[in-house]
Image (spheres, rainbow, N blue to C red):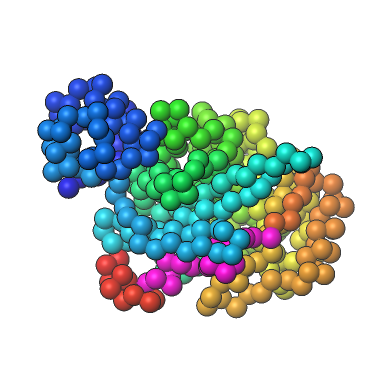
Amino acid sequence: MTSLLLDHSFEKWNLGSVPKYRLEQLRHWIFDQGCLHWDEMTNLPKSLRDDLARNWDILPMELIRSQGSSDTTQKFLWKLRDGQLIESVLIPATEGTQGVRASRMTLCVSTQVGCAIGCKFCASGLDGLKRNLSTGEIVGQVLLARIQAKRRIDNLVFMGMGEPLANLPALLPALDQILSPKGLGIGARHLTLSTSGLAPKIVELASYPAQIRLAISLHGGDDETRQKIMPINKRFPVEELLNACEAFIQARKKMITLEYILIEGVNDDLKQAELLASHARRLNAKINLIPYNRVEGLHWNRPSIHQIHAFLKKVESGSPPRVTLRMEKGHDIDAACGQLRLREMNDSPQAATLM
Ligand code: SF4
């Protein structure tokens, strides 16, 4: 059985003699209606539905576990065709001012099974890279999460398992389907790619036509500090990374975000705050400060509230364009990327042996 969405965007579907207008009906059912059952596609002839059901299924994955937290962050564990496990996290937020409040839904999407980058704060890196996700496995996470949420997904952040820029050949066609009004119709400005800092890929991404957002996992103001957290810094040191960001910004005329996880005694001293503010000024970039979210098996800690605020104050005094302090949601459901998958593999030896 082949998955219709595994590798091909809907523009490239080829089902032998099935005419184009039928393919458009199929697209409508899947992307506009969120219908994933051939039987329910009632304007297709029964003979065609039976034929499709014999030879094709729609998505290359299934939901095997869903966890919700008290603040209604929801985490999904998907099982892929080859038994590999990946995660997506659905995060609701209420935004707005002066009595006009709107609730928005953000999905954190994975792009690889495991990850080769090995950032020291991350559960996804603990087990290394298994493989890249296909285009359909990336799009499928959004389609299925939308069905689970029973509502539209407003924002996508590619901050789940994997380094998105290490999988551009599958990711860019997935973005095309996600952005297309005939696909998931999510606006480019509502998509954020987060990278550990693959400098040459940042430059490559600058030529992608849509106005997607870019976030850089900086986490250290100088090479010595950043290297303790981000081993990738040995390949692409801070200056090379900042140069690549400048090239991206120049090509795209788009503000980027510097992500900075605050870890006690590792990168939370005020000298780092000064450097962070200075890099943000140089790039005209926003700063997101994220106090560390404890990962099982790792020994780092979140700084005290006092230190978090001292760091924030020091950054602000360096006049970067904008700083936000983000206390992450979902602590009680292992929301940091890779944690639910690791737990499932530890709890279920047969899941691990499928990998
Ligand atoms: S933070 Fe992202 S890039 Fe770093 S190890 Fe985790 S998944 Fe990979």
Residue at point 53%, 67% (across, down): 333
**Hey, which quadrant is residue 313 in on the image?**
bottom right
Tell me if 38 is positioned left or right of 272 in this view.
left
- Point out the stretch of residues depicted in magenta: 327-345
Tell me if 283 is positioned left or right of 69 in this view.
right
How far across and how far down the image is residue 170, in percent? 38, 42
Q: Is residue 244 visible?
A: no
Q: Is residue 105 above or below residue 300?
A: above
Tell me if 262 is positioned left or right of 71 in this view.
right
Residue at point 31%, 53% (across, down): 61
Q: Is residue 26 above or below residue 168?
A: above
How far across and how far down the image is residue 262, in percent? 70, 64
Residue 339 colored magenta?
yes
> In the rendered image, which quarter contains the C terminus?
bottom left
Q: Between 43 and 353, which is closer to the camera in this rendering?
A: 43
The residue at the far right in this view is 317
Q: Between 22 and 195, which is closer to the camera in this rendering?
A: 22
Residue 16 colored magenta?
no
Q: Is residue 215 above or below residue 31?
A: below
